[in-house]
Structure formats: C-alpha cells, structure tokens
Amino acid sequence: MPPEEFRRYGHQVVDWIADYLAHPERYPVLPDVQPGALLDALPRAAPEQGEPMEAILDDFRRLIVPSITHWNHPGFLAYFATTATPPGILAEMLAAALNVNGMLWKSSPAATELEQVTLGWLRDWLGLPVDNFGIIFDTASISTMHAIAAAREAADPEVRLRGGSRNLVLYTSEQAHSSVEKGAVAIGIGQRNVRKIAADEVFRMRPDMLAEAVERDLASGLRPFCVAPTVGTTSTTSVDPLPAIGEIARRHRLWMHVDAAYAGMAAVAPEFRSLMDGAGQADSLVVNPHKWMGTPVDLSVLYTRRPDILRRAFSLVPEYLRTAQDDRVVNFMDYGVPLGRRFRSLKLWFVMRSLGRQGLAARVREHIAIAQQFADWVRGDPRFELCAPVPLSLVCFRKRGSDEENQALLDCLNRGGEVFLSHTVLNGRFVLRLAIGNHATGLRQVERAWELIRASA
Amino acid sequence: MPPEEFRRYGHQVVDWIADYLAHPERYPVLPDVQPGALLDALPRAAPEQGEPMEAILDDFRRLIVPSITHWNHPGFLAYFATTATPPGILAEMLAAALNVNGMLWKSSPAATELEQVTLGWLRDWLGLPVDNFGIIFDTASISTMHAIAAAREAADPEVRLRGGSRNLVLYTSEQAHSSVEKGAVAIGIGQRNVRKIAADEVFRMRPDMLAEAVERDLASGLRPFCVAPTVGTTSTTSVDPLPAIGEIARRHRLWMHVDAAYAGMAAVAPEFRSLMDGAGQADSLVVNPHKWMGTPVDLSVLYTRRPDILRRAFSLVPEYLRTAQDDRVVNFMDYGVPLGRRFRSLKLWFVMRSLGRQGLAARVREHIAIAQQFADWVRGDPRFELCAPVPLSLVCFRKRGSDEENQALLDCLNRGGEVFLSHTVLNGRFVLRLAIGNHATGLRQVERAWELIRASA
C-alpha cells in the first residue's frame, strides 16, 4: 500500500475511532454472539490475492465489531476496567509506524532511554525509592514470573547452571492473583512449594500465619525464598500488610515481590499514597499502567532494587547481539526472556504528559468516591449486602439469598447490554464485583447500574 | 481528551506517518546520538498538570525521532530486517482503540476467534498439518520458553507439582538462537543441561552428533527430553536437517521444537516450501509474522500438535476468571503465562488479506533473489569472501583481512547513515551480515550498499 493510500485509509480509521470513542455506549458492552459464530462467518482459507482495504475495513465493521466485548464502554464494570485514552492511542499509532525493536540501546536509543525516563517518573509518582530500576513487560503475569526468577537467582545462584530448585518455597496469600502461582509453576518451583497463606476476615494476608509457615518449612529443611504480597487483590482489592510482611521477609532473607498491578496507581493521589506503605522495602514490585492509568494494553512495569540479580538471572549475549559498551547504555534484553521489545514507553510518555499527575489523581479519586457511593447504596438496601471493605474502586456485594439467585442476577444484568459485571467467590459464596476503572465511567453510569441491579433483583 | 480533539490530532498523526513512510530514507538509519542524550534532554520529573498535545507531538518530532533507529529505512540491513506495512499499522490503530483484553473468549469473542482463524490460515500457508493449534505471544523467545515448558510437562508431568527437573537435558545447535538457552534457564532446566550440538561446515546441526549426545546422556542416567532445531538460524540462516533430527526425536521420545521464527515465512512461496520439510513432524514450532511478513512488532506464533500438554503445563483458573463452558470456546489464557492478551490477531488478518499469499510470496522471492545477486557480487570481487551459503535473504561476508579491518569497515558503513548492517562470528572470525527483509528494500538499495561497501573497503 503506497503511503498516499495509507493516508486516505488512516484518516478513515481515525474518524471511525473518534466516532467510536464518542459513543461506545451505542454497542452492547457484551456482544450477543454464540461461540464459533465468527469462526463460521470467516473464510476457511486466506486469500491468494490481496484484497482492497475497503473490503477489509467493511468486514471489520460488519463482523469484528459486533463480536467485541467493549472494554471502552462506560458500563464495563467487570474484572479491572481499563481505558485506552486518546493520547495513548495516538502514541500506539506512532509506535506501530516506527516499528522499532528496542532489544538493545543501539537498536533504538529513543525506545531505551524513554523507557528509563518514564519509569523514573512513574517511580517517583508511586513514592518508590530512587534506587528502583524499572523495565516494561507485556503483562503483570510476565513481570511477576521474572520477579520470582530473580528471587530464585538471589537464593540459589547455582540454579542457573544446575537447574532444578526442589526445596525452594514461595509464600503468597490465598487471595493472591493466580499469576503468582503460575509464574512459580512456569519456572519450575512446583505448585507444592507455593504456600497460600490464610487471609484475615477482610482478605489480607496474615503475617502471623506467614511467620509460622516459614518457620515450619525451615524446620523441615526447606528453603523459603520469596514472599509475594498484594496491594489491591483481584477479588476484593484488599491490601496485604506490607510492613509486617517486610519484617518477616528481612528476618528470613526472603525476596519480597509486591503485586500492585491494579492498586499501585492509586498512589498518584497523595491521600492514597499510604496504600503503598512498606512497598519501598520491596525487592521488586509490579504495577500496570494499562489498568488504571489510561495506557492501552499492554504495558506492565516491573521495578526492582536489585537489577544486578535480575540481569544475572537472564543475561545471555550471543555474538550477533554484542555491541560496544558504554556505562550509560542499558540493553533491556539482558533483563528478561523477551528479546524483541515493542516501543511501549511512548504511550506511557504521552499519557503521563497529557494527563499530568493531577489529571490521573483526579480520575483515581473520582472512581474511589463513586465506589464509596455505590457501597453506601448497597448498605442502605436490606435486600443486599456488602461482602468486603471498599478501600479502592471495587465493590463486592451480593443479593441476600442463594448463589444461584446471584448467578441469575449477574446473568440477567450482563444480558442487558448496558453493564458488564464479573464475579468472585468469597468465604465460599458467589459474589458480584463492580469495578470502576474506565475513565469514561462516571456517577451516572454507576447510578444506572444500581437501578438495573435493583430492578433485576 | 474529547473525541473531537482525538480526531484532530489523529489526522495530524496519520499525516506525519504517511510522510514518514513515503520517505524514511530522509533520516539516517542509525541516529547520530550519544548514550544518555535523551535522558539529559528530558525533564527529571513528570508534569503535575497535563500538557497540550501540540507540545507532546512537537517533542516527539524534535527529541524522539532523531534518536530512533529507523527500522523502516530501506537501508536497514541488520539483524533480521522487518516491516510495519500500512495495513498492519491501520490494524494496530484499531486494536489500540478497541483496547480489548482477549484473556478469555468472553472478554472478547472476536479477539479469540480471529486468532483461531488467522492462525489456521497461516498454518495452511506454512504447510503445517491441520492438527496444529496456534497461539500468539509477543516474541519468539516467549514462544520458545512455552514450548520448552510443554516439553518438560510431556516428559515429567509431576514437575508441575513437585518443581525441579534436574536430569532433563535439552539439545539444540551451537548455531541456535540464544532464546533456546534462555528459555531453558528461565524454566529451571539449567545451562549445564543444554547441549549445543556441533554444526557441520555449513552451520547445520549434525544429526550424528545429536544421536551420540543423546545416547551418552542416557548412558549417564540423564533424561533427554527436547530437541530444538532451527529453520533459518540467526547467524547464517542455515537450515537444520529436520527429517533426520525428527527421526532421532521419535526414537528417543524427545519433544521436537522448531525455531522457524525468521525463515518459516518463506514457505508462503511454493518453491521454498521444502525448507520446512520435516516440520510437520514437530511437536511445536515458532514463526514470527513480525519479521518477514509485514505485521508491526510484536507478533510471534507458537504452533503445537499437543495443545493438551501446553494447557496442562499452564492452566490455573481462579474463580474470578471462571466462565461457563462451551466446547467451541478457547480461553487462550489457559495456554501460557500471560493473562492479559492484546488484540494482536487483528494486524495479522489485515496483512494477510491486504497482501494475499501471492503478495507476500512475491516479497520473499524478491528478497531472496536480491540476496543471491549480492552474493554473486561478493563472489566476483577478490577483495571479499562469502562466509556461508545463502539459502534465503541473508548474506554473510567479509573483506579478506583481519577482524579489526572488518570491524572498521562495519563501523564506517554504519556511520554513513545510508545503511545499517550487523555482524556475527563464524569459525572464530568477525563476519558482516547483510539481511534483506524490509518490504521497502529493493535491488537499488542493495546495489548502493555494495557500492558503499566497496568504497569503504
């Protein structure tokens, strides 16, 4: 496609996006499609000859869009809601066009240095110590896997050569995200060596139970090496007591990896900075700007105060990637598994500059205030009950009644097309989750959600 | 930013991209910047208040672009050259705007089913058996890490629970990409348990040496579990003899993982299909559409004929991600570490449809023909020598003389701004690599490169 044709279609696509962003609520948030419908609608084989862009864009509108779950919809209140802000989209357009691969400093100095600059800025916003080194990965799961591998390297430097790690034990909360366990399984720690420490009545990891488990394992000749607490768990956004956990980590020389993928961003607002108390002591921490911060997926950041260990765990430089050294040069490929690296920092830079700290803090503050308001409505209606504290922008609640009634309530809500909520299980009971995180979501949409919930109930 | 503002800036950005794609050669392919220059040019702290988009776009043009290594430049002949085709860029714009996370079928049916459809199309183009299941990851390194983890799962299903894998041994060529070793180290196989099998005089893994190594390890009580041959090695694009290696793999029940990240795409042209002979027997195979196929980074595809094993290695479904089952539903999160999944298949669909198989085959054919032409020039000039066969679009050559002279030649070429070549080491000698892979690169640019090379020599 010649550049002039790109210009023409590019303008069409921008217009489509602008119209879409102006009215995402024209679409049902969850599409009304059956599994396999798109498989059946598309040809079995790719075309032999190239097709005109008109036909492709037409099929995009006709076949793809109706099969999309609209994460941009202001009624998207499931999982953790996210936002592709317009500045983030503009940056992704440019990154796709530049198409640099930032594996080495030399393979694109701007990609490497902008990653250093923006992650320094973000570190300061989060109140992390200046000795934190940051690196961008695609997802929190991959960031966390790298953190656990670094923890392993710190505990047992021979494992890199020898392989295996049979006696290493990792601790996390029974409320932790599944990515902690998955990362441990991936790198060969073994599910059996992942201890899911009991949480208290408000879903926070219990330090006393952690200390007990570590001591029990030590007495059995096992080797505790890592503890992974969470700031903002996925089920309820509970915040594990980092200072007490950090104390135990220091005593037993455990690597502390903090999962702040969702809630870390709240620290941009000074009044929520205290959520991160104790995070400064962490050996590593993950936070996802693609969650609450307005960058399009994917962009996860891993911070570590021990980049030398992370590098030791992953650096392998073959001749064809060797470049002249300079002490100001960082080659990010040395700090992880992925060699290829998309220019992800560009969208972070656009979003941080376009919204500013105060702009982002205002969104966080508003979302949290709306969640408190919604929680009040739930408290005020005897047909419903809150199922967890609401420290952030997620509300866990249920209709008083059976799990089946609550599942039916959820299904009914989600079929309507105006809102999409998800669920979890707390204390053995089915619970609805209403998560506010999309920048387009305001009080109005949440009021409407409450109206629908009461009507469906 | 209101949608109308996005529209305005979106049009500006499209115009910038169209101008850029029309003339990437206006920029030096390698920027003339010192390490740290961008670090010094940008503010130490992020802005408190949001800034106008004019200022951000202005800084992008003024500070970022001059610090970019231009992978779009037709003189980019380093590493493996890649292309962000205009249809791929259009698709990335739409994917950024939709911002779906395809972790589950439900979280975006279109993202899941388009991944199934396009990977089925691509499988057929590559001539792989229809029982191959495909999944998109960001990079070949991550794809390969997953393949090795699946191989481990197949060899030792208890490792998932128990951890460790002390006696498992993996085989690859001394010419294999570093990602094979890195993947093995990451998942805890241990560097010591990675055997780098000697290559023959044209850099292909020697099956006799592989068989010997496997038998020696078996005799020592070790457990051979995986062999990773390459179709198109990074240093020279040599092609390992898959049929003979497959035979050994079958005999010893090794998982065969084929790294076809670069060269697999050549199979879209029927006359190069034979490069993949024996790939149909592989347990898994990685190919990177973001290399030769015109999709912007990142997009790597892992195929496996044993998706049940891959799933068993990685599936962990917490309650908050549990959805109603349907036998036509694939939840891609079950097949790997990353939970979040960007809508990457959209750009694959755009590119495959816009160029068609014949359009892509024409690019591959032209690039290979130009490389043969360049190799002829090298052969015809007594000052130079070819250092490896040229089966594809990469030429390894050197000036007859010392390594220092060749390093100086490379530095001189790359300083000029018209071309960017990289290097490798073969048989202990420093060798220049000229890699043709950008869709904008034609005979004219390679003629010019040869002119510059002769002049610099």
Image (spheres, coloured by chain):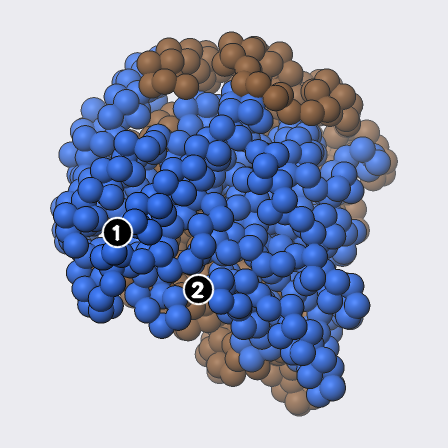
Chain colours: A brown, B blue
Q: Chain of mark 2?
A: A
> Image height check: is A226 above or below A141?
below
Q: Is residue A146 visible?
A: no
Q: Residue at x 55, y 15 (%)?
A: A51
Disc 1 marks which amino acid? Asp
Residue at position x 77%, y 35% in the image: B329
- Rendered location of residue B356, percent (x, y): 56, 23
Horizontal relation, residue B109 to residue A118: left or right:
right
Which label is found at residue B400?
Answer: none
Left/right of residue B223 with respect to residue B396 in the rendered view: right
Given residues A454 and A224, the one toward you in this image is A224
Can residue A19 be seen here? The reply is yes
| Left or right of A330 in this view: A406 | right
- Residue B160 image position (x, y, % from top left): 72, 67
* Amino acid marked by disc 2: Ser
Kind of element beneath mark 1: loop
Given residues B332 and B195, the one toward you in this image is B195
Indicate the chain on which mark 1 is placed. B
Residue at 19 percent across and 57 percent down: it is B409
* Residue A443 image offset from top left, x and y in percent: 50, 24
Using the image, determine if residue B373 lies above or below residue B255.
above
Q: Nearer the viewer, residue B51 or A184?
A: A184
Q: Name the residue carrying label 2.
A: A284
* Residue A355 versus residue A449 in the image, above or below: below
**Where's the C terminus of chain B, which quadrant?**
bottom left
Q: How far apart, in angstroms, are the residues tagged by discs 1 and 2?
A: 55 Å
- Of the residues tagged 1 and 2, which is closer to the observer? 1
Asked which secondary structure carries label 2, the reply is strand
Q: Nearer the viewer, residue A144 or B152?
A: B152
Left-right relation of A196 to B367: right
Residue holding disc 1: B381
